[in-house]
Image (tube, rainbow, N blue to C red):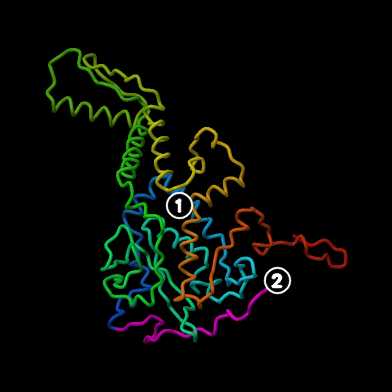
Amino acid sequence: MALFNRISKAAISPPPTKAAAAGSYYSNSVNNGGANMIGTYYSYVEGDARNRAMSVPTVSRARDLMASVIGCMSLKQFSLVWNGDEMEKLPQAPRTWLNKIDPTLPNNFILSWTFDDLFFYGRAFWYVTSRTADAKPASFTRLPAAMVQTLDQSGPVWFAPSKQIIFQGGNLDPNDVVQFLSPIQGIVYQSTQAVATALQLEAARYRNSSSAIPAGILRQNGGEPLSAQELADLAASFNVARSTNQTAALNEFVTYTETQTSPDKMLLIDSAEFQAMEMCRLCNIPPYLAGVSVGSYSYQSSAESRMDLWTFGVRAYADCIAGTLSQNNILPNGTYVEFDVSQYLSGEYSMADYGDDNSEQPIPNGVPLQS
């Protein structure tokens, strides 16, 4: 007979125990010297390649959309049982860390930035900061992927969890590091020329937008011929004048001829639209989610948009995170976790989710509640 809505209490975590360390819960053994640098946040960086990619508006939009989905979903724990016909999920009481992965941070933050590492670098790292009595992890802290080096794998494709991990110049015990390996290669290693093109295009648009007077040609019509240096100086001084004033002055020997360029061409609108499409391809999101019109996809309902974002963009990363956290080095054998995606896809949110729902509270003595 099928089992429905049964809750197992056996999965509740035993009380946590701290790792051995002098004045800290990080191990500081000779073979784990990098752990001493964990928590020195002033030295943490996200990487120049990642920051350059984030300066492209479409990449920033894609990252934020997918990170918001990962961050808004909760993790739930279950086991699998055979009901006679198929494997069925049996809900379990969650281990304590599922609701507080890092005791100092909300799950929304650490999960979103774990996705960020997977999205840009193709892998992410958590360090185990404490363990329970059964030697399973009880809490974690995130390590920026840009600061982690693996001596046994050079990338940019990662084949398996590393056994030689370096963090800020010191070794880390791989048994204390949870390694998330994305099925999708990090975008800082893909299409680097496309990202560079997008940045150069933005720079060109910025230059063209900095002047109220269209580009043109200065032509000398009379007088003593000017040398190449004098012509260059004249053009430079004219550029300065036209960028700071609406009126420019020329003598009778010099004329200015505007190029036949419309504002949309000066701002490279068509090129920017094409490059935005290229960045959507790079980030694996439907173009219309980044504001790029593509015919029949130019309009979608909110439900369809959520489903497209989940299916084409987020699911691979969500399955990577959930699958890694379901490994036997994290949870007991036969125990799994997954993201609760049903609420996100349905869009059924209420103020009760945010602790501010007075609609169902009883009215004392018939007196309306005061706002």
Q: What residue is pinned by disc 1?
A: 63
Query: For numbered disc 1, what is the local secondary structure?
Result: helix
Q: Position of residue 369 (x, y in %)?
A: 79, 62
Q: Earlier in the sequence, mark 1 or mark 2?
A: 2
Magenta part of the chain: 3-29
Q: Main secondary structure of the magenta part?
A: loop
Q: Is residue 22 magenta?
A: yes
Query: For numbered disc 2, what is the local secondary structure?
Result: loop
Extreme residue in the right direction = 366
Q: Is residue 41 magenta?
A: no
Q: What residue is pinned by disc 2?
A: 1
Question: Which three-letter amino acid code belongs to the residue tagged 2?
Answer: Met
Question: Between tags 1 and 2, which lies in front?
Answer: 2
User: Which of 241/368 is in front?
Assistant: 368
> Looking at the image, which residue is at 58% across and 79% down?
11
Question: Which three-letter amino acid code belongs to the residue tagged 1?
Answer: Arg
Q: Is residue 273 left or right of residue 158?
A: right
Distance from Cα at disc 1 to Cα at disc 2: 44 Å
User: Which of 44/341 is in front?
Assistant: 341
Q: Position of residue 76 (x, y in %)?
A: 58, 68
> Looking at the image, which residue is at 24% across and 20% down?
218
